[in-house]
Image (cartoon, helix red, strand yellow):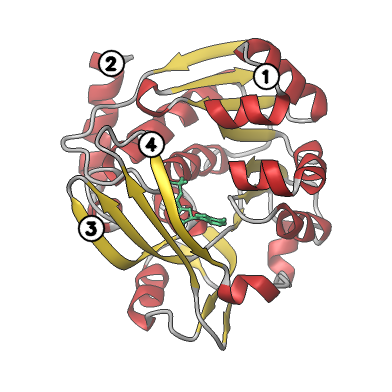
Amino acid sequence: MSLVVVGSIALDTVITPKGRRDNAVGGSATFFSLSAERLTRVRIVGVVGSDFPEAALNEFRKRNIDLEGLEVKSGKTFRWGGEYRRNMKERETIYTELNVFETFDPHLPEAYKQTDVLFLANIHPALQLKVLDQMEADPLVGLDTMNLWINNSREELLQAIGRSHIIIINDEEIIQLTGMHYLVDAVRYVQELGPHTVIVKKGKYGAELFHYRQHGVYPICPEEILTDPTGAGDTFAGGFMGYLASRESRKLSYEDYHEAMIYGTVMASFLVESFSTDKLAAVTDREIRERLLMFRREIL
Ligand code: AMP
């Protein structure tokens, strides 16, 4: 099945106890695509400024990634800076510069409007809605979000959630969204809004899958060395949605969702081993296969 993602493409400055990286390629759509493209072709909807490195665009082009929906606008690329504390769980956003995102008005290429699977990665929910409005087919829709939009753009976010089938959200955000502290109540509340599938990410405690009334718990796959968790959620989402899109049809079983959780978890374990996309981009298919095997045999 075909897969479209809309999200941010960024230049990130990240500080962790392991060091820092300035103006590295990041953004939700970037991490998502580099993860999903291992399984299926990905079409990106997004925007970068004229300062975005051509070499980075060429890295996308060399892969299973279609950039027809990526706009290059005069001006500066979206920039984000963050710093992690010692346990790497707490992160402080140092700055968010919207730049070309401020006036971004996505116009999807014709082929994108017929996509089977659509992922609304973390960007302003108004942009997520603009992309949904352009769909001519009836895709399987996944959505990610963050605390900023839950606080500042709640109405638009609720509309976007109402039009989605799958939501990927972290444990703090689902409490913030629903006001409910008991996880199952919060999940049922979100399912009432629309999505049949809710994935709750719990950082180093892994993630939980709620698919209709079925439920599974997944630990993390141990990484070799934790260097920079930025983009782990997007990388998980890329592996998860990429796996679903690699199936033949929309008739997806619980087993498919279970496999997608495993794939997402393993891809995220590579991402965190380096700054930016270094490891995610370099990991070989063999390393992925081996870690999938190890995860199934020793962790699950
Ligand atoms: P995560 O670690 O999953 O929260 O994702 C981090 C990525 O999200 C970074 O690469 C940032 O560039 C991107 N990001 C941070 N804030 C925003 C925002 N407000 N809108 C879109 N993307 C963002």
Q: Label 4 amino acid?
A: Glu
User: What kind of element bears circle 1?
Assistant: helix
CA–CA distance in space, label 1 to label 3: 36 Å
Q: Label 2 amino acid?
A: Ile
Which comes before the other along the chain, label 1 or label 3?
A: 3
Q: Nearer the viewer, residue 95 or 230?
A: 95
Q: Which mark is residue 90?
A: 4
CA–CA distance in space, label 4 to label 2: 25 Å
Which mark's residue is nearer the viewer, 3 or 2? 3
Q: Are marks 2 and 1 in contact (CB under 8 Å)?
A: no
In the picture of the structure, the residue carrying the numbered disc 1 is 187
Indicate whether 7 appears above or below 77: above
Which mark's residue is nearer the viewer, 2 or 1? 1
Whether residue 41 is visible: no
Check disc 3: other Cα within 10 Å, few if <14, some if 14-19, many if 20+. some
Q: Residue 299 carries which label?
A: 2
Q: Nearer the viewer, residue 178 or 290?
A: 178
Indicate whether 63 appears above or below 52: above
Indicate whether 123 appears above or below 193: below
User: What kind of element bears circle 3?
Assistant: strand
CA–CA distance in space, label 3 to label 2: 31 Å
Which comes before the other along the chain, label 2 or label 1?
A: 1
